[in-house]
Image (cartoon, rainbow, N blue to C red):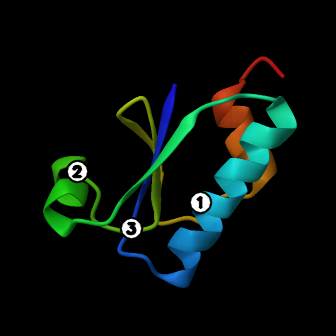
Amino acid sequence: MKIQILGTGCPKCKTLAANAQTALDQLNLDCEIEKVTDINQIMSFGVMVTPALAIDGQVKSAGKLLSPEQIKQLLNPSA
């Protein structure tokens, strides 16, 4: 599983990355977190508002700062 944080490096983007890491730690998952900061690459996802979170290349959230709990629900919907 690969998690991508789409954003230019603003404080909300950094917080989203930290929240994603917290969610992974709490679920005991070992996944790669990639920060995508290139605006053209972000737009290739169809994202116009950051921060955004993609899981395995599929955008799950855009323009919101998700909490670790919200991210855990996206990573493990059966939990």
The tag earlier along the polypeptide, 3 or 2, is: 3
Residue located at (64% from left, 70% from top): 15
Foreground pick, 3 / 67: 3
Using the image, determine if residue 10 lies above or below residue 14: below
The tag earlier along the polypeptide, 2 or 1, is: 1
Query: Which residue position is annotated with label 1?
Result: 17
Q: For the residue labelled by badge 2, is the local secondary structure a helix, a strand or a loop?
A: loop
Q: For the residue labelled by badge 3, is the local secondary structure a helix, a strand or a loop?
A: loop
Using the image, determine if residue 55 lies above or below residue 63: above
* Circle 3 residues within 10 Å: few <14, some 14–19, many ≥20: many
Foreground pick, 34 / 52: 34
In the rendered image, residue 53, in percent from the top left (x then y), is placed at 48, 50
Residue located at (19% from left, 55% from top): 41
Residue located at (64% from left, 34% from top): 74
* Circle 1 residues within 10 Å: few <14, some 14–19, many ≥20: many
Query: Which residue position is annotated with label 2?
Result: 46
Foreground pick, 21 / 78: 21
Query: Which residue position is annotated with label 3?
Result: 7
Label 2 is placed on what type of residue? Gly
Say which mark, if any, is on residue 29.
none
